Image: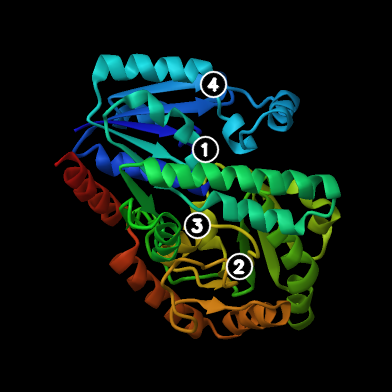
């Protein structure tokens, strides 16, 4: 098939979950289909598209820089969600029209609902939505934690508008992919029986994230995430303020490896004992082998966390909140440790530190689960079969 895949960003380098999913979808689908990628980028000059050009028949990048105040003015003076305005581009619309006229795609796949604003350009061609998460629920959770009355109002407006856009996209698409059975059932409940919703779960490149059981001294905790994403920032503050001090009381030599983007947003919290900052690392994989466990203390967010699956594949034991491992069919005490209070989270971290054999057993069970349920090849096979059904 001749497929157009439309993304709100260039899915490379692989430094956040959405990029990882889209890149691996392209990598696997390109074995069977001709894939053209069209993406909005902040800056053409800094875009690294070379690996994608090797996989795609064509890569089309349209520059659309962030325009903070013009976009906010458009938000308050119009009726569209900010997340849609942020990716609105007349140049992109024109480019997509020309692409479709030239290539006559058999199928279009839109990544994220904020890009559904371009779905009307393709006539009778089937348009599929890959819903990386339920976006409005993410906005709803972040809005609840906002302290400023103005920000609370903005989030309430955004929530209402974004939910309307998402529900319209779910109704209009030829097919919707969800990243977990949980979100599939939530989407189906909201749209009824009019749209087919299929789980194409997030996955792991299990060759790249190979299993290693050897660890260091048993006292290194990895926290992985960009602080430019509000749920990660909230989770890091929670861990640094409420959880890590409890760990240090029992294990004064414990190390916390903060790996991610814009770590300066954490301020003086990064200067505490045992805290190491590693900003914008070029490759996250070595940190999965450097650490002794991954901490995922998320209290907000939607979708599923690819970093949890990658850690499970690489042999790194995981301690997570229920939100942190949401949508992943991992069993507490068998594949992962789940803890939803600061005291329970610290106790789970200390259990793995004090019992390496237990950590190894968790890791081995987790790797087995990933191989059974969470590889990118499995997700691509599900998508490919769905494409054939839509085409028929």
Marks 4 and 1, how far apart at CA? 12 Å
Marks 2 and 3, how far apart at CA? 18 Å
Image position, residue 45 (x, y; %): 55, 19
Image check: 77 left or right of 375?
right
Image position, residue 4 (x, y; %): 32, 30
Element marked by disc 3: loop
**In-front residue for pair 345/1:** 1
Q: Earlier in the sequence, mark 1 or mark 2?
A: 1
Q: Earlier in the sequence, mark 4 or mark 1?
A: 4
Q: Earlier in the sequence, mark 2 or mark 3?
A: 2
Look at the image and tell me whether residue 271 can be seen: yes
Q: Which residue is disc 2 drawn over?
A: 295
Q: Earlier in the sequence, mark 2 or mark 4?
A: 4
Contact between marks 1 and 3 (CB within 8 A): the answer is no
Image position, residue 63 (x, y; %): 54, 20
Contact between marks 4 and 1 (CB within 8 A): the answer is no
Image check: 41 left or right of 211?
right
**In-front residue for pair 30/7:** 7
Location of residue 285 with respect to 76 vertically, above or below: below
Q: Which residue is disc 3 drawn over?
A: 303
Q: Nearer the viewer, mark 3 or mark 4?
A: 4
**In-front residue for pair 356/189:** 189
Q: Which residue is disc 1 drawn over?
A: 114
Element marked by disc 1: helix
**In-front residue for pair 284/124:** 124
Contact between marks 2 and 3 (CB within 8 A): the answer is no
Q: Which residue is disc 4 drawn over?
A: 89
Image position, residue 168 (x, y; %): 46, 43
């Amino acid at each position: 098939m001749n497929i157009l895949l439309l993304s709100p960003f260039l899915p490379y380098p692989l430094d956040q979950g959405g990029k990882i999913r889209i890149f691996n979808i392209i990598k696997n689908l390109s074995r069977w289909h001709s894939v053209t990628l069209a993406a909005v980028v902040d800056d053409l000059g800094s875009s690294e598209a070379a690996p994608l050009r090797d996989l795609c028949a064509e890569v089309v990048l349209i520059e659309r820089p962030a325009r903070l105040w013009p976009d906010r003015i458009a938000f308050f003076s119009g009726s569209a969600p900010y997340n849609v305005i942020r990716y609105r581009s007349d140049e992109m619309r024109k480019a997509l029209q020309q692409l479709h006229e030239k290539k006559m795609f058999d199928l279009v796949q839109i990544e994220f609902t904020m890009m559904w604003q371009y779905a009307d350009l393709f006539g009778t061609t089937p348009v599929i939505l890959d819903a990386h998460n339920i976006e409005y629920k993410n906005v709803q959770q972040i809005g609840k934690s906002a302290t400023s009355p103005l920000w609370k109002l903005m989030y309430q407006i955004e929530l209402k508008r974004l939910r309307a856009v998402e529900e319209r996209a779910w109704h209009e698409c030829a097919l919707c992919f969800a990243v977990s059975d949980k979100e599939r059932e939530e989407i189906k409940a909201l749209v009824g029986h009019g749209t087919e919703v299929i789980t194409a779960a997030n996955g792991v490149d299990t060759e790249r994230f190979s299993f290693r059981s050897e660890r260091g001294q048993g006292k290194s905790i990895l926290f992985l995430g960009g602080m430019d994403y509000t749920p990660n920032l909230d989770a890091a503050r929670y861990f640094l303020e409420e959880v890590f001090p409890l760990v240090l009381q029992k294990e004064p030599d414990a190390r916390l490896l903060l790996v991610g983007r814009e770590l300066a947003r954490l301020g003086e919290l990064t200067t505490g004992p045992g805290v190491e900052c590693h900003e914008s690392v070029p490759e996250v994989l070595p940190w999965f082998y450097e650490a002794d466990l991954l901490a995922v203390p998320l209290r907000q967010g939607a979708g599923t966390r690819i970093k949890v699956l990658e850690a499970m594949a690489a042999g790194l034991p995981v301690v997570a909140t229920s939100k942190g491992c949401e949508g992943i069919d991992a069993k507490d005490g068998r594949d992962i440790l789940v803890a939803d209070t600061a005291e329970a989270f610290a106790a789970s971290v200390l259990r793995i530190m004090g019992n390496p054999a237990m950590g190894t057993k968790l890791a081995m069970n987790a790797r087995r689960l990933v191989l059974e349920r969470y590889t990118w090849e499995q997700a691509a096979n599900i998508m490919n079969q769905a494409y054939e059904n839509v085409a028929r």
